[in-house]
Image: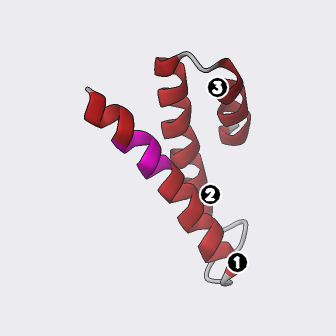
Amino acid sequence: MDLILQAVPLAGAGLILAAYVALQRHWWTSRASGYLWFNLLGALGLTAIAIADGRAGFIILEAVWAG
């Protein structure tokens, strides 16, 4: 379980950062499906861990980011 609590947020942050890099390098636009999916999945992963860990501020931030 502890490994999952470390892997999920790392993967989520990695997806969001990968989308950001792709946007900055003009590989994707902000409307590209890959960009949107990477951001959504990354935010959902971070939200799930925030809920499991009981971090209210982070839950709100990630829920808004995913929405």
Q: What residue type is labelled 2?
A: Leu
Residue 21 or residue 54, whichever sits in front? 54
Residue at x 58%, y 42% (from the top left corner): 43
Please provide percent x and percent y for residue 67: 70, 37
Q: Mark 3 points at which residue?
A: 59
Q: Is residue 28 left or right of residue 18?
A: right
30 within the magenta span = no
Mark closer to the chain start, 3 or 2: 2
Mark 1 neighbour class, 10 Å CA radius: few under 14, some 14 to 19, many 20 or more: few
Q: Is residue 9 magenta?
A: yes
Q: Where is residue 26 in the image (x, y as percent from the top left)?
A: 68, 83
28 up-or-down from 62: above or below: below
- Dot 3 amino acid type: Ile
Kindly tell me whether residue 33 is visible in this rendering: no
The quadrant the N terminus occupies is top left
The prevailing secondary structure element of the residues shown in magenta is helix
Which portion, as a residue range, is magenta? Answer: 7-12
- Where does label 1 land, which residue? 24
* Badge 3 density bin: few <14, some 14–19, many ≥20, Cα 10 Å: many
Residue 49, above or below 45: above
C-alpha gap between disc 3 and disc 2? 20 Å
Residue 7 seen in the figure: yes
Badge nearest the viewer, 3 or 2: 3
Mark toward the start of the polypeptide (3 vs 1): 1
Q: Residue 9 carries which label?
A: none
Q: Contact (CB < 8 A) between labels 3 and 2?
A: no
Q: On the image, numbered disc 2 is attached to which residue? A: 36
Image point (61%, 73%), residue name: 21
- Residue 57 in percent (x, y) is at 71, 24
- List x then y, in percent, for residue 22: 60, 75
Q: Say what secondary structure mark 3 lies in.
A: helix
